[in-house]
Each structure stands twice: as C-alpha cells, then as structure tokens.
Amino acid sequence: MAKFKAYDYRQRVFLPVSLEDQLMPGTLEFAIHTLVETRLDTSGFEQKYRNDETGRTAYNPKILLKIVLLGYARGLISSRKIEQACRENVVFIALACGQQPDHSTIAPFVSSMKAEILPLFRDVLLVCQEMDLLGGTFFALDGLKLPSNASKEWSGTRSELHRKKERLEAKVQELLKEHVQEDNQDDPPSGPGGGDRELQVQRLQKQAAGLEKWLQDNDPKYGTTGKEISSNVTDNESAKMKTSHGVIQGYNSQALIDAKHQVIIHAEAFGRGQDHAHGPPMLDGALENLQSLGHGEEYLAGKIFTADTNYHSDTNLRKCQELRLDAYIPDIYFRRRDPRYAAQRRYWPRRKRFALEDFHYEEATDQYLCPQGNRLRRKVKQIYREGMVHRIYAAEEKDCRCCPLQLRCITNKGGKRRYLRVPIGVELANLSKRMAAKVDSELGRKIYPQRFAVAEPVFANIRTHKRLDRFTLRGKLKVNIQWLLYCMVHNIEKITNYGST
C-alpha cells in the first residue's frame, strides 16, 4: 500500500515574520513606505480628527495612504480589494504594519483628500527634482478619457429627462392597470406574482420621484457655443465623450509630462471631452507646482511644449503665446501637407470643393449666389474664428436637397445645406496659420513626433499596467483625487527606477 505524508489541519504553526524585512530596498513598496514616512507632509490630515481626549483611536493617515498607493500600483482600485489584500497579501500586511482597515475606512479616506492631495503630489514632485529626474526643457500634454461612476441611461437635456420621467410614470400606470385587470379575472394568468409587480411599481415610482426632484434642484448645462448639452442625474459634472472604446459617461484626465524621465508635473480631471480649453488650466497648474519647487514665474518661457491636434485652438495657442512657450500643436490637416505621408490613402485630400470665390456676391441684397444659381442668405452677422471676424451665409435645404452639384458643395457627412463663411474683419493675429507653418517646418517635423515617446507610455502605464479603466467616485473633486493618486504612483515608480530612496 502506498505511503503518504500525514497532514492535520488542526495543527498550529508559528511563522516568524519580520514586517520590516518584507519591504525590500529597490521595490515600489519600499519607496512608498520611505517617502510617506520621511518626505510627505501628512500633518494636514490631523485637523480632521477630534479624538485627542475622547473617542476611539484612528488609523494613522500614513498607513492608509501607503496601502492606497500600493493598491493603485497593483491595479486594486476597489477599497474592498485593498481591504482583502491587507488580510491576505504579506506585502500589504507589512506596509499596513499588521493593521487591517476595512473598506468603510479606506473609501472615505480617499474621497476626503480634497485639500491634501495637491500638496502631497507636490512633495513627490520635489523629490523627483532633487533626484534630477526633471529635464525642464521639453513638455508634452495629453489626456485619457475614462468612464466614471455614472450611468449613460440617466443622461440627457432637460426636455429629454422630462420625457424620461413621463415614460416612467406611464409605465407605472400601465402596471397598475394590468394589476387591476388580473384581480377582476376569475382565472388569473400564470406569470410574475403581484408581489413582483408591486416591487417593480415601487422602484419605478422612486426613480420618477428622484428624477423630478433632480430637475427641480438643477439648472440646465450649456456648452461653449451657448447651446444646452446633456446633463447627468448620477454625476452632473461628468460628460458624454467619444473614445476609441465607444461613447462613455466620464472624465477627461489630463497630464502634463516632463520628457526626461516621463515625470508628471501636473494632472487634473475635467468633465469635458474636447481639449480645446484644457491648455490654460493645465499650464497654470504646472507653473504653480513648479513655483512651489522654487522656480520663477518665467520658468516655462522658451521651453518646448507639444500637444496633439485636439489642442489646436485659439484658446490654447494664446496661452502658449502668453507664457512664451516654444509650442508645437498641429492642426488636423498637418499630415496631408507632409510629403512623408503622400503615399498613404487616408491622408489624400478630399474631392475639390467649391470655395468662396465660386460664389457670386450681390451687394444690394447682401446675398450670395451658388454655382447652381441658388441663393445663400445671411445667417450670422459676426463670428470670431481663428483670429478673424466672419459672417455666415446659408442656403435653403430644399435647394440643396436635389442639387446636381451637391457632392462638390456639401462634403460633411449628414449635411443638409451649404454654409459659407465669409471673412469681413482684418486678421489680427492668426495664430493657427503661424502654428501650422511652424509644425510644417523641418525643425517642427523633427520635434513634434517626439511627443509620442513622451506622453503615450505614461498613459499606457496607468491604464494597462496599473489597470485604471474607470473611476469609482462621483464628482470632479473626488475623481481628481483618484487621478492625482495614480499620477503620484507613476512618479514614485520613476523615483524607484531612476532615483534612490
């Protein structure tokens, strides 16, 4: 008969473990432990506690900050997962010094770091500077759009949300009517019982009442053009955004990165999908962070700054001019003008379209005649675009619908009429054209491609390696805390790899 080693689960085993020995120098957990203990100022948390004379002892904020940073570094964004790790993972046990804070302690700690998060981020940035990880000559700005803890189903304009409330109320009336009809029948049909229907009615009534209260308490949201945009009942500071993964309800997380070791010098989450206005707040925030490190107001002057085509706007270009940055922000057509991409079909110019000179102006009526003889009447008296003042003229839909020249006149997908933008003002300072010429120059075509090697690996590290694929909190302030914590982890990782702690 075969012989096996005996085992007994009732036996007790003593495992001598030194918590300090689990935090080995050169590891990320050791860097987190050392930085939090010696370099990060956590005194700001103390004013939140009132247990110096009475009350239960609290977990030290340093312990909570350490396990949150390591949890985010390991892809554990859920406070319950971090709690579980503090019970089962020896590294987390060592970092928490044997303590086991639960999720109801970890989650409020993260969401309450509104005043403390930026000073902590700057403390880490100061360590990066002292270890010569900041080059200070080349910067890249980019963003990452991530879903938040909000539902797309509860998004829409006020009129759309009103209709949704009416549909919920109509569904309630329909269910109540079915219930009455079944009660009047001698042989009720088989199916969900009355209890299930009653619960469904209560749920729908609660949703309709909550939506009604939300509509009373909140004003409509308006975009940059003055038109109403979609609001969201669960998180009204988030926005619908188009991404490569589809349309999401979330936040646009921005990061300004130093090129030398890809250290993030400023980060912020915005509830806007378009990047046309993100340049000023990101550059101002970066300048404040750099000033806290001892640099002057003119630190960014003459430094190279790159961003992709989404940032090519008058607002961003003017901010770069104000700070005297050596900026390279291409427009959406820059690859079509680049001879290196001439052989790629995706960058071929579109079919020749009718230009302004193909339309005849009648001064007496202030109207334009198109090549087909149809009239375009003035729609907008003045509009400011790209440093110039324009008037907008528009044709009638019925004239464009059956026009034989439609393919040469209306090239926008889904367009129903031709709009004509006519410049009427003197060009004050066309920053867009000047920037396009700068990017198209031989030097610009060498500098701009370097942006990919600076910015893209940072977001790949945070999204893929750190597994940040969504935000678990609601509201810009709380989402911004999570984003800054992940950027702190990224910078601490740079300290681990290139510095010494």
Image (cartoon, rainbow, N blue to C red):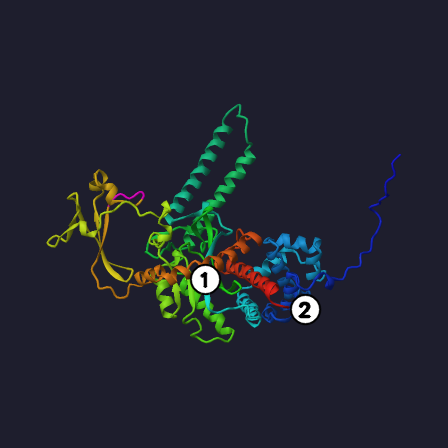
Q: Which residue is mark 2?
A: 54
Q: Is residue 315 left or right of residue 122?
A: left
Q: What is the quadrant of the C terminus in the image?
A: bottom right
Mark 1 Cα-neighbour bin, 10 Å: few <14, some 14–19, many ≥20: many
- Could you tell me how far apart the alpha carbons at marks 2 and 1 are, in whole angstroms? 51 Å
Which circle, 2 or 1, is nearer the viewer? 1
What residue is disc 1 on? 140
| Point 25% across, 46% down: residue | 352
- Looking at the picture, how far across and down is residue 278, in whole percent? 41, 61
Residue sitting at x 44%, y 64%: 282
Pick whichever, 281 or 477, lies toward us: 281
Q: Name the residue type under label 1.
A: Ala
Quarter location, residue 104: bottom right
**Which region is colored magenta?**
413-417
Q: Which type of secondary structure does the marked residue at label 2 adopt?
A: loop
The quadrant of the picture occupied by the N terminus is top right
Q: Label 1, secondary structure: give it.
A: strand
Q: Position of residue 236 (x, y in %)?
A: 45, 54
The number of numbered discs placed on residues in the rendered structure image is: 2
Residue 397, image quadrant: top left
Q: Main secondary structure of the magenta part?
A: loop
Q: Of the residues shown, which amino acid type is indicated by label 2?
A: Thr
